[in-house]
Image (spheres, rainbow, N blue to C red):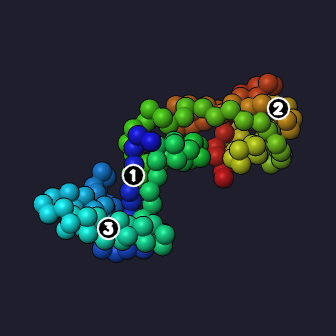
Amino acid sequence: MKYLILVIVPALMPSAGMAADRPGGQAPVLRALVECRGVADPQARLACYDDKVAVLADAEQAGKVVVADEAQIRQSKKALFGFGTVRLPILGSDDRDTPKQIEAKLVSLRNVGYKKWEFTLDNGMHWRQTDDVEIFPKAGQPVIVKTAAMGSYFLKLPSGTVRVVRTQ
């Protein structure tokens, strides 16, 4: 595990609002734990660590603190693919691991009007066609959804490529 992110959810803990609003700012619960390093007396330092770790563990158990490793952050960025350029400070500002495309299978589709389709993928994503390009989708086909210009997306099927927007 390379990185560890700790976030206090402001709605659940009002005193943490300022730290959570500041990207990269340390949450008060973590800051208190880190400050234990400065305690000179070994017994007092151990007591400080024990106390602050218990507070941190209780906060996480109660859902007031979220701790995520690098793999969980990458998975969250993948799950958010298609919702535009939404930036969540808790996911970091590094775009290197943000996916540029998603490969999946088409599990179901629904005709929603003249040359318009709604697609459900095997990863749970739902997309709706926004252009009027005629395609002939079939359930079970592999699809690739790619980022395009200005926050738009393309869905590529064996029968063609269409512009789409994520709906769910």
Q: What residue type is labelled 1?
A: Ile
In this view, the mark in front (2 or 1)? 1
Labels 2 and 3: the sequence-earlier one: 3
Q: Which residue does the numbered mark 2 point to in the structure image?
A: 141
Residues packed near mark 2 inside 10 Å, few (<14), some (14 to 19) or many (20 plus)? some
Q: Mark 2 touching mark 1, by CB under 8 A?
A: no
Element marked by disc 2 = loop
What residue is rendered at 48% in x and 73% in y?
62
157 and 26: which one is in front?
26
Q: How far apart are marks 2 and 1 (CA)?
A: 38 Å
Q: In this view, does 86 lie above or below 66?
A: above
Q: Which residue does the numbered mark 1 point to in the structure image?
A: 5
Q: Which residue does the numbered mark 3 point to in the structure image?
A: 50
**Location of the N terminus (image quadrant):** top left
Q: What residue type is labelled 2?
A: Gln
What residue is rendered at 78% in x and 30% in y?
142
What residue is rendered at 20% in x and 66% in y?
43
